[in-house]
Image (tube, grey):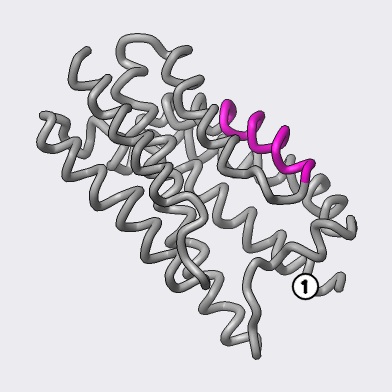
Amino acid sequence: MKRIITLYAFAGFLILINYRLGRNIYEWAFYDVLFYVVIPLIAAYLLGFKPNELGFKIGKRDGYIWALALFLLSLPISVYASQLENFKAYYPIFAYSSWEDFLLKELLIGVIMFAHEAFYRGIILFPLARKNELAAIIAQNIPYTLVHIGKPPLEIPYSFIAGIVFAKMDLKSESFLPSFLLHWIGAVVFDILCTIGA
């Protein structure tokens, strides 16, 4: 338990360092990979955790089926939210000069989403979940929800609910990849909806 507490304390420190770091999408992707994947993985390794214990594996098929079902269920919500002025004014979070530039930056969004899911639904979720699943879900979901402060207000309760659902889905899959794919594809679709609706 001591190594889990140490890992979580260090993770909290990394969240504080990385919060709002980066002046553009390139820097944001770089810092997220550094502070949410590379450094935490090194720290976890030094504490005796293996990557597959932290959700870094393909996982079970059920998680991907759930991810697809949740994506389809969330589409009407995305269509509705993309019509709201505060979402249209905020998304996409990057400026783009062409559809090629748009697609490149959506790939960078994928890098950012991978880092977030690896950190919250991988490194923070899995170690504690083996001892107490509910505590692990709460431990990853509180900071995950708080980092959404500053985005459109409806995103905060939505991210709180999504954080719980993603965690349950990933625990069943034994991998954070289903929530990564759901989060990234959902974000790309939402950016497209906000762009064509602008």
Left or right, 31 with respect to 83, comes to left
Q: Give, as a three-letter code, the residue at label 1.
A: Thr
**Residue 33 placement (x, y as % from top left):** 34, 57
Picture quadrant of residue 70:
top right
Q: Residue furthest top?
A: 132
Where, quadrant-wise, is the C terminus in this rendering? Answer: bottom right
Q: Residue at x 65, y 89 (%)?
A: 98
**Residue 177 placement (x, y as % from top left):** 41, 44
**Residue 148 placement (x, y as % from top left):** 62, 44
Q: Is residue 151 magenta?
A: no
Left or right, 61 with respect to 198, comes to left
Q: Residue at x 18, y 39 (%)?
A: 43
| Label 1 crowd bin: few (<14), some (14–19), many (20+), radius 10 Å | some
| Magenta-tinted stretch | 153-165
Compared with 5, 190 (above or below) is below
Q: Residue furthest bottom?
A: 97
**Residue 124 placement (x, y as % from top left):** 36, 31
Where, quadrant-wise, is the N terminus in this rendering? Answer: top left
Of residue 2 and residue 162, the one placed in the foreground of this image is 2
Q: Residue at x 68, y 67 (%)?
A: 92
Picture quadrant of residue 16:
top left
Left or right, 75 with respect to 8, comes to right
Say which residue label 1 marks: 195
Q: Main secondary structure of the magenta part?
A: helix
Compared with 65, 115 (above or below) is below
Q: Is residue 161 magenta?
A: yes
Q: Residue at x 22, y 36 (%)?
A: 52
Circle 1 SS class: helix
